[in-house]
Amino acid sequence: MKKILLLFLLCFAVNGYSDAANFEVGDVFESKKRTTSVVLYKFKADLLMLLRNIYQPHRSKTGSFRNLEPRYKYDLQKGDKIILLVSLEERGKEIFQVALVPKKKSKKQDNPYYYVVPDNFNQLVFVEHLTE
């Protein structure tokens, strides 16, 4: 009986760890929470600089952090959707170029294209997969 129970638990544990997130170009995600930690960056260079500083924190004695302009990043709000357009591989990390479909239209968002790292996509809800 114990062996059957252990085998059953082992199957659940292996199944839970084997569900790797596979994101494809054309997937649409929506933010259902009021606040998420998914941040969209207008420039790819800003995102790469952030990744470089996270993975190499002691690069110089004075620090290599630079303040990012708040107008060049966008925190996803409740009801916003993103569409994955292009998958890029930069420095061993997967980066996506996404199109933002905001719930509330704003005049200051003239460019709907942003860059994002899919680390926190588990906070978003998969809506659909676009074929075209």
Image (cartoon, helix red, strand yellow):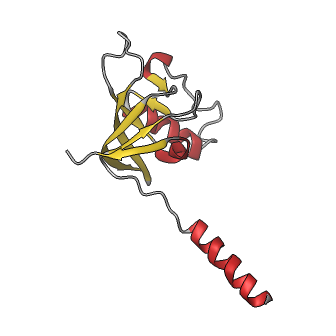
Give the total number of marks visible in the rendering: 0
What residue is at 44 percent from the left and 54 percent from the top?
A: 92
Residue 109 position, x and y percent, is 36, 16
Residue 6 position, x and y percent, is 74, 83
What residue is at 46 percent from the left and 24 percent from the top?
A: 73
Name the residue furthest front.
1
What residue is at 23 percent from the left and 48 percent from the top?
A: 131
Foreground: 35 or 37?
Answer: 35
Name the residue furthest left.
132
Instruction: Please say if 52 is above or below 99.
Output: below
Name the residue furthest top.
107
Instruction: Please say if 86 is above or below 114.
Output: below
Instruction: Please say if 125 is above or below 16.
Output: above
42 left or right, relative to 56? left
Instruction: Please say if 129 is above or below 104.
Output: below
Foreground: 118 or 93?
Answer: 118
